Image (cartoon, grey):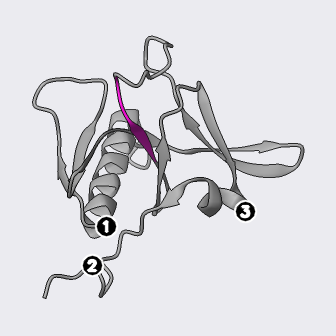
């Protein structure tokens, strides 16, 4: 591996850290499982809690249209079930998106329509989210 190449585990961890930062900025309390689980994070906000699997978004093109794709398969090639996680967070660059687990192999969203299909989570804490 050259100095400019990053390992898949480094890229994955970077995505997890960005996901945590975005969830915190959105007012969630975030924790990681102590032992290996099918989900990467647990997020709690008020009475709501989510078990979240974090994925690095792949960019693909279909019929000349750019798409973001979140992979919905575990390493054993099985789909993430609802007993594995409630939602996915997809990270592309500095953009973080929350998508409901619908037990699909892949989740596709046109780049031009991604904000309508998945929930965008900004990394920046806004004035509304700031603690006074």
Question: Which image quadrant for residue 61?
Answer: top right
The residue lying toward the viewer, choosing from 18 and 29, is 29
Q: Earlier in the sequence, mark 1 or mark 3?
A: 1
Give the spatial CA distance, label 2 vs label 1: 7 Å
Quadrant (top left, top right, bottom left, bottom right) of the N terminus: top left
Up/down of 37 relative to 125, above or below = above
Residue 36 in the image: x percent, y percent?
A: 20, 23
Identify the residue shown where x is 13% and y is 88%.
132
Residue 100 lies, in percent from the top left, at 48, 41
Q: Which mark is residue 129?
A: 2
Precedes in sequence: disc 2 or disc 1: 1
Q: Is residue 47 left or right of residue 121?
A: left
Disc ID at residue 12: none
Tag 3's secondary structure? helix
Residue contact at pointers 2 and 1, CB within 8 angstroms: yes
- Tell me the quarter of the picture where residue 94 sits: bottom left
Q: Position of residue 71 (x, y in %)?
A: 54, 32
Q: CA distance from mark 1 to mark 3?
A: 23 Å
In the image, taking residue 38 as reference, residue 117 lies left or right, namely right
Contact, mark 1 vs mark 3 (Cβ under 8 Å): no
Query: What is the magenta range?
Result: 84-89
At horizontal 30% and vertical 84% (from top left) the residue drawn is 128
Q: Is residue 22 above or below residue 38?
A: below
For image coordinates 34% across by 24% down, the residue present is 84
3 vs 2, front mark: 2
Secondary structure under the numbered disc 1 in the rendered image:
loop
Tell whether 63 sits left or right of 108: right
Q: Residues within 10 Å of mark 2 (few under 14, many from 20)?
A: few
Q: Which residue is mark 1?
A: 26
Q: CA distance from mark 3 to mark 2?
A: 27 Å
């Amino acid at each position: 591996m050259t100095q400019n190449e990053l390992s898949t585990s480094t890229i994955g961890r970077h995505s997890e850290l960005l996901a945590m930062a975005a969830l915190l900025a959105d007012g969630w309390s975030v924790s990681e499982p102590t032992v290996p689980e099918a989900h990467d994070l647990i997020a709690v906000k008020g009475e709501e809690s989510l078990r979240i699997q974090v994925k690095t978004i792949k960019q693909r093109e279909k019929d000349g249209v750019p798409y973001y794709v979140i992979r919905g398969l575990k390493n054993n090639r099985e789909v993430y079930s609802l007993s594995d996680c409630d939602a996915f967070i997809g990270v592309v660059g500095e953009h973080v998106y929350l998508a409901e687990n619908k037990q699909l192999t892949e989740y596709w969203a046109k780049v031009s329509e991604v904000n309508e299909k998945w929930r965008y989570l900004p990394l920046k804490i806004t004035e509304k989210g700031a603690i006074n």
